[in-house]
Amino acid sequence: MELVLEKVNKLKGNISVPGDKSISHRSLILGSIAQGETRIYNFLDSLDCLKTLECMQALGAEIDLGKNDSIKIKGKGLYGLQEAKDILDVGNSGTTIRLLTGLLSGQNFYSVLNGDSSIKRRPMKRVVEPLRSMRADIWGRENGQLTPLSIKGVRLNPLRYTLPVASAQVKSALLLAGLYATGETVIKEPLATRDHTERMLEIMQADIKIFPPEIKIKGGKELTGTDIFIPGDISSAAYFIVAASILKGSQIIINQVGVNSTRTGIIEILKKMGAKIDILNYRIKSNEPQADLKIEYSDLKGIEIGKEEIPLLIDELPLIAVVASQAQGKTVVSGAKELRVKETDRIKAIVSELKEMGVDIKEKEDGFIVEGPSRLKGAVCESYNDHRIAMSLAVAALLAEGKTVIKNSECIDISFPGFEKTLQKLINF
Ligand code: S3P
């Protein structure tokens, strides 16, 4: 599929975005191993989350998609999952494979995990290595660095571990394994990453203590099912936050967006660049903060973004390159090497496509440098089958003279089915 877009005047109106992807994955996994019922509201019905759903069902979870707006899970308890009859296919979803590797290491059965061509290239050693030091029996290509991963569940030892890469997926995999360990697991994260797993474990009454930068979890304690209200995904809202900030005359409201401080890096950075973003009606639901966001066009200036800030806006970095192309002066992103091992090499991808569109952007080993502002021109762009690259380019297309074609745009459904429709609503207001 191709997404074809042209220059627009401004964005106006009021929208919501679909539920948070990270929280949706976690709600399925934790709901399935809790005791009692979990009801999930505003679940993200996207390809990635459906892969987690299918994997959990293959492991015997009782998940009822229902006819109304909620998903009902009849929890099996910590030890109620069963061996799947086939390979568990995670599709394109890094979160699914990393979290399930942790979960499955402590089961009393055998599992095999595999995914698409992107997953087959992504690093797994970061989860396999610490799990092996808990006694996990995991095998994979190149000594467990790459999928397929084959896991023979065992009784796990607890772990004391400092994360060498800032990764919420690794942290979450270890917390899930920690639920099954014979004692207390302590994880230290030198840089804060998204903390949805910890927050959900807390409301499900795990034996967890959160003292940043350390998290302690004791194994063996059953979780209790609960209602989970998932806020809109700030990573999806980000495309419209940025578009409204750089299109003259825009003013939009995005309702019910998750504003957990481990995810709001995009708002903080845009504000530092001069963006006008108001956080309205701040409230907490299911242990997660949410708010309505009001965004107005504003003149922006370039900024330096360094290592500490990266995990707080990791998925929004391709979009930062787009904003920077409209800001006055230089924007430098450093310490973002992780972008090279996402669904695609996001540094290479965004630099090459934005160059085509007329942006003054240079690749760095650990980020990029943009000199703004630039006049953008329409181009035929590759999405590299990466949803975040496709949507970031779509935002750039709204400012570009002429037509922009984004190839293989079906990948957008990985995280944001309905993206184009929501965008059209703001264009045609
Ligand atoms: C995610 C964590 C991040 C993020 C990904 C979702 C999660 O990955 O990029 O989109 O749900 O835990 P890393 O943990 O690899 O940084």
Image: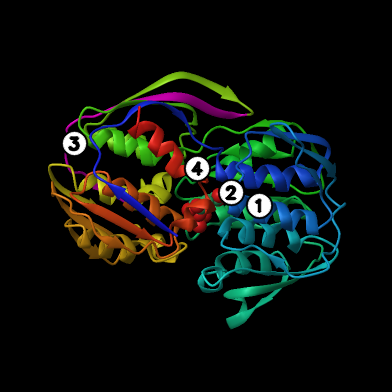
Residue contact at pointers 1 and 2, CB within 8 angstroms: yes
Label 1 element class: helix
Residue 295 painted magenta: yes
Q: Which mark is residue 205?
A: none
Residue of label 1: 50
* Mark number displayed over residue 300: 3
Mark 1 and mark 3 residues within 8 Å of each other at the beta carbon: no
Which residue lies at the image location 47% right of the left edge and 63% below the top edge? 343
Write down the region rendered in magenta: 287-307
| 4 vs 3, front mark | 4
Measured Cα–Cα span from mark 1 to mark 3:
38 Å
Question: CB atoms at circles 3 and 2 under 8 Å apart?
Answer: no
Task: Give the quarter of the image for residue 37.
Answer: top right
Residue 418 image label: 4
Q: How far apart are marks 4 and 1 (CA)?
A: 16 Å
Q: Look at the image and name its color scheme.
A: rainbow
Residue type (three-letter) at the residue carrying disc 2 = Ser
Q: Given contact means CB atoms under 8 Å apart, are the residues at marks 4 and 3 in contact?
A: no
Left or right? Give the position of 123 relative to 160.
left
Q: Identify the image quadrant of the N terminus.
A: bottom left
Q: Does the magenta stretch include residue 365?
A: no
